[in-house]
């Protein structure tokens, strides 16, 4: 196993955590910001081997859990499942820019929805929030927009090894 | 269909991580923000906080700048709204300033003191209309019902002569200012006691003519109405008329010099109509024609300079 993409993706995730907790603390159109960590997990999982990709999702979620007050592991769980879904569906990403954007949007929606549902099950009351619809709608949209920058950057570092080539038996 | 030879392991890894996540959440909730979870949070936040501070120091100014650019349209609208508000307030200030000027003028009118206590019988009035650009007369809101009569002198709040009643109806009257060519000439007294005649030129200024002058007329000298003299009784004594604009020396025994009226005829808003002569003049429905119709019984109201001079001359020669 080549450690380079794992190290690079960890660097991307840590940078995403820093940017999320600083830049997106203030850049919040309509009081909602993009979920850069989720987006970075999706972007990296497109190119990584399946197990490291799933582990990256867990790590990214856990990191952001450490910056919040929600139960530790809530976003780790959601991001793990998003990373796993990304790995399972990534061969359908590259048909067109539209399909890539759609996939990023749907995976982001899945991540946010999972956090909301599981958080509600664990007493966070997220689904009862008055902002939930706005968040569910805007986070995927913002992620698609920010993805126009993030996806090419990640692809330029991790995309030399295509998923297909890696996954061939 | 792509073959995922090793993807089953990723499924197991995912399931394992999900289970771990559930366990972590459960323990974290049970620990009530204490224990390992809290320690981890504090540790990570302590480590990352300086980095976040440094990043914020760079990011915040950039974000503020970008915010400013993004809000440019909003700022324009706000700017327009504030400009409009400023215009409204400026209009209000002008309105208040006008009201203050009116109040001051009315106060002056209340304090008006005239020869022989004429202020007690004067009829205070407000200017309600003015003629056009080239029309110098103006209308006041008092008429015969208030005791206003044709030919009566009109003064401003400071007692300076404004003009005479030229036309009168029941509740309004028309005033012809002393600067008008159609206004009757005014016999005035210079500070040294010499008499002269002042006439309107239609230019906002007056012309003083002194016949048989033997002394210089000095700039700034105040001219007041002469008062009853012989048969002339158009104006009471002591009304301020104007000031001499430039010094002049007698030439061939006479002086002609320009005079600045004391009353601000263009801005006067409140006036007092003096019931003069004391005995009410015969009421006439005919408007005054200064060219040939004297006001009442006196000869002082004629606008014919020659006639005025002749009368003045004769008056002056009268012992």
Image (cartoon, coloured by chain):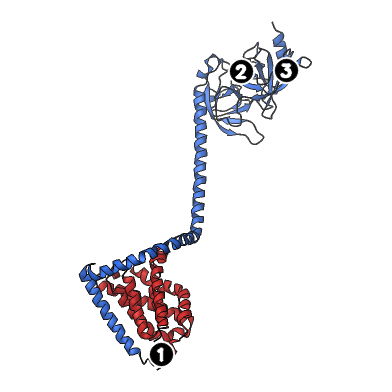
Chain colours: A red, B blue
Q: Which mark is residue B235?
A: 2
Element carrying mark 3 = helix
Task: Work out how far the residue at label 1 is from the one at label 3, CA to CA, in angstroms.
Answer: 125 Å
Q: Residues within 10 Å of mark 2 (few under 14, many from 20)?
A: many
Write down the quadrant of residue A140 in the picture.
bottom left
Q: Nearer the viewer, mark 2 or mark 1?
A: 1
> Same chain, marks 2 and 3?
yes
Which residue is depicted at the point 70% across and 10% down?
A: B316
Which residue is label 1 attached to? A167
Q: Quadrant of the N terminus of chain B?
A: bottom left
**Chain letter of the residue beneath label 3 in the structure image:** B
| Residue that lies at the very extreme toward the top in this rendered image | B319
| Residue that lies at the very extreme toward the bottom in this rendered image | A169
Q: Nearer the viewer, residue A2 or A122?
A: A2
Q: Is residue B51 above or below residue B261?
A: below
Element carrying mark 1 = helix
Which residue is label 3 attached to? B307
Task: Work out how far the residue at label 2 is from the one at label 1, CA to CA, in angstroms.
Answer: 119 Å
Mark 2 or 3, nearer chain start: 2
Q: Residue A14: x, y in percent?
A: 39, 72
**Chain letter of the residue beneath label 2 in the structure image:** B
Q: Residue A141: x, y in percent?
A: 42, 73
Q: Residues within 10 Å of mark 3 (few under 14, many from 20)?
A: some
Q: Nearer the viewer, mark 1 or mark 3?
A: 1
Element carrying mark 2 = loop
**Side of B252 relative to A96 (left or right):** right
């Amino acid at each position: 196993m080549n450690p380079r993409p794992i190290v690079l993706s960890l660097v991307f995730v840590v940078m995403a955590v820093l940017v999320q907790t600083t830049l997106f603390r203030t850049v919040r159109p309509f009081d909602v910001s993009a979920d850069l960590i989720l987006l970075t997990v999706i972007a990296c999982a497109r190119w990584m081997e399946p197990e490291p990709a799933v582990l990256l999702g867990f790590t990214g979620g856990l990191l952001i859990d450490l910056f919040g007050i929600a139960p530790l592991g809530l976003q780790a769980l959601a991001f793990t499942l998003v990373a796993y879904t990304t790995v399972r569906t990534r061969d359908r990403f590259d048909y067109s820019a539209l399909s890539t954007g759609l996939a990023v949007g749907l995976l982001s929606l899945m991540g946010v929805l999972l956090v909301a549902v599981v958080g509600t099950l664990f007493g966070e009351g997220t689904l009862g929030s008055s902002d939930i619809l706005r968040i569910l709608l805007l986070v995927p949209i913002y992620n698609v927009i920010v993805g126009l920058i993030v996806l090419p950057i990640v692809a330029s570092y991790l995309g030399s090894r295509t998923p297909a080539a890696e996954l061939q038996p | 269909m792509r073959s995922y030879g090793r993807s089953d392991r990723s499924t197991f890894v995912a399931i394992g991580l999900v289970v771990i996540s559930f366990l972590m959440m459960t323990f974290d909730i049970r620990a009530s923000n204490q224990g390992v979870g809290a320690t981890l949070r504090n540790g990570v936040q302590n480590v990352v906080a300086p980095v976040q501070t440094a990043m914020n120091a760079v990011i915040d100014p950039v974000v503020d700048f970008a915010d400013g650019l993004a809000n440019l349209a909003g700022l324009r609208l706000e700017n327009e709204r504030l400009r409009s508000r400023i215009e409204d307030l400026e209009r209000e200030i002008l309105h208040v300033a006008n009201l203050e000027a009116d109040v001051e003028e009315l106060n002056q009118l209340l304090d008006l003191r005239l020869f022989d206590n004429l202020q007690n019988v004067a009829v205070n009035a407000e200017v309600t209309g003015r003629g056009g650009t080239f029309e110098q007369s103006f209308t006041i809101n008092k008429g015969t019902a208030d005791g206003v009569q044709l030919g009566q002198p009109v003064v401003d709040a400071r007692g300076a002569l404004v003009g005479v009643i030229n036309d009168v109806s029941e509740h309004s009257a028309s005033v012809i200012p002393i600067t008008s060519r159609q206004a009757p000439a005014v016999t005035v007294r210079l500070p040294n006691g010499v008499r002269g005649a002042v006439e309107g030129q239609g230019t906002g200024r007056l012309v003083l003519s002194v016949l048989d002058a033997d002394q210089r007329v000095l700039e700034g000298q105040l001219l007041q109405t002469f008062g009853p003299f012989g048969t002339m009784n158009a104006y009471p004594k002591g009304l301020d008329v104007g000031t001499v604009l430039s010094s002049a020396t007698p030439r061939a025994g006479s002086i002609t010099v320009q005079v600045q009226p004391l009353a601000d005829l263009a801005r006067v808003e409140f006036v007092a109509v003096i019931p003069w002569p004391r005995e009410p003049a015969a009421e006439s429905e005919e408007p005054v024609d200064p060219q040939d119709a004297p006001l009442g019984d006196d000869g002082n109201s004629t606008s014919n300079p020659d006639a005025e001079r002749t009368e003045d001359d004769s008056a002056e020669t009268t012992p």
